[in-house]
């Protein structure tokens, strides 16, 4: 699969908007200043920097290696005037621009006295001197990175005091004069600079924290007298504390209501609907601004915009100026708007030349982007994002920042090219092995089955690509080195993501959201994608949003449009999932590089596909980001935003009254088991990717979780648990399965193989221990593909096709070796039992040796487990009461069955379909999407659904009012005979 969504490509023949002066044409004084240190952001905005492409080459970016000069006196900023409410500084300060060092850029409050300045005067002088280099600034900045603004203030306040005599104020301190506003003084506001939970002694004399030394009695009496004599100081302190508590409630955070995450802005829930725009030229800027206005009119006030961040501290000023320009741009067209910056880390032009060992290197000697394993690169990235966030957070415009979406090629390897063999990756892999095997060389040699390997000689194994291999699993000790590398590759990326997210949270004082695109477990066809450590990312408290596009495999108008991330697992960890709808409309140009993204055939297909994606997100309690991927005006359509306005109103009503969701079927996928797969095409694709369409067409209420989630206390109770790849189950999860799942009549279904491995290696008794059914490998080179031998069981009685699976040689494949199990199917070639069910008393176990289920077989398993099946057709039916989403794959009738009497309202056509209905017939066209609300009258009213009087509604449609089940009239012939 090609690399996805490289968004920043300038249009041919169009100039880039607002580019800075070339370095060679800068005034001499400005050029000297720029070589010394990155330029401080002036209160009057600097000329907008030239926006670069997301994946630019070193040659294209060579001319931008020097920072742009800040607008000096007499220069004209190439931006629009500051809108009302967004002050950028006073006129006096605009006339006297001050150039600052890189150290002062990293400081929390520019031009504001903070205690820590006294400890770093020498650093400031060095940075201001003409001989200081950018390398010195970077070294000093790394010390600042380790401290948050609050921590810096605390460090200064906790500085040791002379122990000669305790310091006691004899007279109450005078209140300092009120600080000037940003408009008057051009300085950051107190709300942006003061620590959120601290009040200094100068502001509230009565609350000064005493030094460690013991006070004298005279000092205590003096302090007590001062407290009594200054009641106004107490009132001021109380007001200040109230103000601090109020400010702490403000900002942006992620809240949890009834088990569902939601975005909270200044204490109020906000509908998670976004507009994403890509601005890379003047023409695209005009188109994006028009769509921002349309989104705002529809009630969509969350906007996501690209922001390139050079991984170089001296170049961060470019990104700061561009971010402020974008904030002004959005505020001009949507005064209520908030901006989520999609921060794209880009290497500086000379990075490969300076650090060739840090570049991704493939087996053929070719190189790629900077390696995810390079500590040098990502430490520089951490310093750059620290400076970016600190510079933005002290501005008045920061109130319009929703958060930061951290992005680097969507955090996956270019897996088509193989493994990363760079020196940085080799060294990082060896360090990872030391931690994995606790620096024990004996354990390493035993695991790798190699008596000569050491922690200094271990290397990344050879990439074999699409070579035909004897077995589909790494089941021998020789394959453990591959398993280790695949785990290392994913954990390395997860570690980078978590580290950067913590850096952002720390430097914005936890007042912004952090988003990341990661966890495409259900979509990548190879195990070396780097996305198999989602559990580590979800465990990080510093990450709020998980984002992913609609699967590119099945997004056409008659396909399900699957989600590549286990959304239920994301919600279980308290994160909010955002579905990125980058549907390519029929009006899209054909010169964009996203050939993997199919274009819709016509306007109706575009509308129905977008409706399908929106209803899919709503059913999964997720947000939506409508994307104009290339700034071409994909969403410049009034009908799109009319639909968005309806969804926004419905979503807001749903947020206020929704209850915790408990799916009837819990689908379990394991990341660690995927690293055991040696032949992805033979095993990973049918086991994981192929099941997504089956689940979508089965018409059941399900949720997809990670296997590691089973140990969490909040894991929901379900009727059936479907394990897609239970190849490896560690001891902790095994204990959770025994204690929490194997009871209360639950049904556990296992595909292909069960518990062959744990965290220590191969476990021969694992299947019997975990599943209660003994299994054994078929003879070598035996085929899969089964035939139903018992069609009187609830699982198999309604199968229209008695053949299950694909006849193909797979090594290994497994059959049931348990006399107490009831056999339902056999392998066609060998006649050995392949499908069996066993009653374990308080629970039931089902083993299926095939790699992929059919829709009918899955429905049979659900009926056996007591799960309601909502549809018997092949259409896409997604259920999460009170919502029901349907997407038709062909012309005809979609027949729905409800578990109990329901009132059904069509939200797309705004009409009542049925009342007290047990089943429903829908006439739909090919590719048509529909969203329905089901439930009682009160529930529909709470959602804001305009349910009219029943008789009036049906009379208006010219339909007879359904009277329910007819009752037999008394006095009929049968009644008279019985009476006689």
Image (cartoon, grey):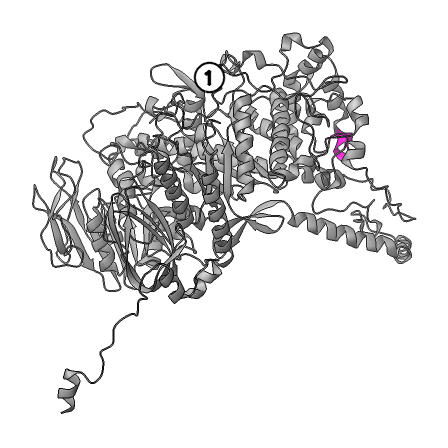
Establish if 457 lies above or below 955. above
If the image is split into quadrants, where does the C terminus sit? bottom left
User: Total label count?
Assistant: 1
- The magenta stretch spans which residues? 110-119
If the image is split into quadrants, where does the N terminus sit? top left
Instruction: Write down the quadrant of residue 464 in the picture.
Output: top left
At which x and y percent is residue 581?
Answer: 42, 37
Residue tagged 1: 357
Instruction: Write down the quadrant of residue 432 in the picture.
Output: top left
Residue 832 magenta-highlighted: no
Query: What crowding class fits label 1: few (fewer than 14 Cα within 10 Å), some (14-19), or many (20 or more)?
Result: some
At which x and y percent is residue 242?
Answer: 74, 53
Q: Would you say 826 lies left or right of 469 here?
A: left
Residue 117 magenta-highlighted: yes
Establish if 380 lies above or below 959. above
The residue closer to the viewer here, 861 or 270, is: 270
At which x and y percent is residue 15?
Answer: 54, 16
At which x and y percent is residue 692?
Answer: 30, 43
Establish if 157 lies above or below 739. above
What residue sits 48% from the left and 33% below the top? 636
């Amino acid at each position: 699969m090609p690399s996805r969504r490289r968004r920043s490509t300038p249009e041919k023949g169009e100039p880039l908007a607002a580019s800075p002066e070339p370095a060679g044409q800068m005034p001499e004084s400005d050029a000297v200043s720029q070589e010394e240190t990155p330029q401080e952001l002036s209160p009057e905005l600097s000329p907008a920097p030239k926006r670069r492409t997301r994946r630019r080459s070193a040659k294209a970016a060579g001319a931008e290696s020097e920072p742009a000069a800040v607008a000096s006196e007499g220069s004209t900023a190439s931006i629009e005037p500051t809108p009302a409410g967004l002050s950028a500084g006073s006129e006096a300060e605009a006339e006297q621009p001050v150039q600052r060092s890189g150290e002062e850029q990293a400081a929390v409050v520019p031009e504001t006295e903070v205690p820590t300045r006294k400890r770093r005067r020498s650093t400031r002088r060095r940075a201001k001197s003409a001989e200081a280099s950018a390398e010195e600034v970077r070294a000093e900045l790394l010390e600042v990175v380790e401290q948050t603004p609050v921590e810096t203030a605390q460090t200064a306040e906790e500085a040791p005091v002379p122990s000669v005599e305790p310091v006691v104020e004899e007279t109450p301190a005078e209140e300092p004069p009120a600080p000037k506003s940003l408009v008057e003084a051009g300085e950051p506001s107190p709300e942006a600079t003061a620590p959120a939970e601290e009040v200094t002694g100068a502001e509230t004399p009565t609350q000064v924290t005493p030094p460690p030394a013991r006070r004298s009695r005279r000092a205590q009496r003096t302090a007590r007298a001062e407290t009594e004599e200054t009641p106004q100081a107490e009132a001021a302190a109380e007001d200040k504390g109230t103000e601090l508590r109020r400010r702490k409630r403000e900002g942006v955070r992620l809240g949890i209501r009834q088990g569902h995450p939601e975005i909270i802005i200044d204490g109020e829930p906000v509908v998670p609907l976004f507009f994403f725009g890509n601005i890379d030229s003047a023409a695209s800027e005009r188109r994006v601004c028009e769509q921002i206005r349309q989104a705002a009119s529809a009630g969509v006030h969350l906007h996501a915009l690209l922001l390139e961040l050079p991984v170089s501290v001296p170049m961060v000023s470019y990104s700061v100026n561009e971010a402020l320009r974008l904030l002004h741009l959005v505020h001009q067209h949507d005064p209520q708007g908030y901006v989520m910056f999609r921060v794209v880390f880009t290497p500086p032009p000379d990075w490969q030349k300076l650090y060739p060992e840090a570049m991704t290197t493939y087996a053929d000697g070719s190189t790629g982007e900077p390696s995810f394993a390079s500590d040098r690169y990502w430490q520089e990235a951490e310093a750059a994002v620290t400076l970016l966030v600190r510079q933005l957070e002290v501005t008045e415009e920061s109130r319009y920042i929703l958060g930061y979406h951290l992005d680097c090629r969507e955090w996956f390897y270019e897996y088509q090219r193989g493994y990363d063999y760079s020196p940085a990756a080799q060294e990082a892999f060896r360090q990872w092995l030391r931690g994995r095997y606790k620096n024990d060389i004996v354990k390493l040699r035993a695991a790798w089955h190699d008596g000569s390997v050491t922690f200094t000689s271990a290397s990344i194994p050879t990439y074999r690509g699409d070579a035909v291999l004897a077995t589909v699993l790494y089941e021998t000790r020789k394959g453990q080195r591959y398993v280790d590398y695949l785990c290392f590759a994913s954990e390395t990326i997860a570690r980078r993501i978590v580290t950067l997210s913590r850096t952002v949270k720390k430097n914005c004082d936890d007042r912004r959201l952090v988003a990341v695109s990661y966890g495409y477990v259900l979509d990548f066809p190879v195990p070396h994608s780097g996305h198999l450590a989602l559990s580590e990312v979800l465990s990080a408290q510093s990450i709020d949003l998980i984002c992913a596009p609609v699967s590119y495999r099945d997004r056409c108008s008659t396909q399900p449009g699957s989600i590549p991330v286990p959304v239920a697992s994301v919600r279980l960890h308290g994160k909010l999932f955002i579905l990125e709808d980058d549907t390519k409309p029929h009006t899209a140009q054909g010169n964009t590089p996203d050939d993997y993204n199919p274009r819709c055939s016509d306007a109706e297909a575009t509308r129905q596909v977008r409706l399908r994606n929106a209803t899919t997100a709503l059913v999964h309690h997720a947000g939506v980001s409508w994307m104009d991927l290339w700034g071409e005006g994909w969403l410049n359509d009034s009908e799109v935003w009319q639909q968005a306005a309806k969804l926004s109103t419905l979503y807001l009503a749903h947020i206020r009254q929704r209850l915790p969701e408990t799916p009837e079927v819990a689908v379990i996928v394991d990341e660690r088991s995927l690293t055991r797969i040696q032949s992805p095409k033979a095993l990973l694709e049918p086991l994981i990717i192929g099941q997504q369409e089956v689940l979508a067409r089965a018409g059941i209420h399900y949720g997809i979780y990670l296997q590691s989630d089973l140990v969490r206390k909040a894991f929901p109770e379900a009727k059936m648990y479907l394990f897609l790849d239970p190849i490896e189950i560690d001891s902790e999860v095994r204990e959770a399965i025994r204690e929490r799942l194997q009871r209360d009549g639950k049904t556990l279904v296992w595909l292909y193989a069960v518990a062959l491995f744990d965290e220590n290696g191969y476990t021969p008794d694992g299947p019997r221990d975990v599943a209660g059914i003994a299994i054994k490998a078929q003879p070598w080179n035996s085929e899969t593909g089964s035939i139903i031998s018992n069609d009187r069981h609830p699982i198999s009685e309604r199968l229209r096709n008695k053949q299950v699976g694909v006849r193909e040689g797979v090594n290994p494949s497994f059959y049931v070796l348990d006399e107490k199990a009831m056999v339902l199917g056999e392998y066609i070639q060998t006649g050995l039992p392949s499908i069996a069910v066993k009653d374990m008393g308080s629970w039931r176990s089902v083993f299926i040796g095939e790699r992929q289920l059919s829709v009918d077989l899955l429905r049979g398993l659900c009926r056996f487990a007591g799960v309601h099946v909502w549809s018997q057709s092949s259409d896409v039916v997604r259920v999460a009461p009170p919502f029901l989403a349907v997407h038709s794959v062909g012309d005809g009738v979609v027949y729905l069955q409800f578990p109990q009497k329901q009132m059904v309202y069509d939200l797309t056509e705004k009409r009542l379909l049925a009342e007290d209905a047990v089943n429903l017939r829908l006439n739909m066209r090919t590719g048509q999407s529909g969203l329905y609300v089901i439930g009682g009258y009160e529930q529909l009213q709470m959602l804001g659904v305009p349910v009219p009087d029943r008789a009036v509604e049906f009379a208006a449609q010219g339909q007879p009012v359904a009277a329910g089940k007819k009752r037999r009239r008394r006095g009929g012939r049968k009644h008279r005979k019985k009476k006689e």
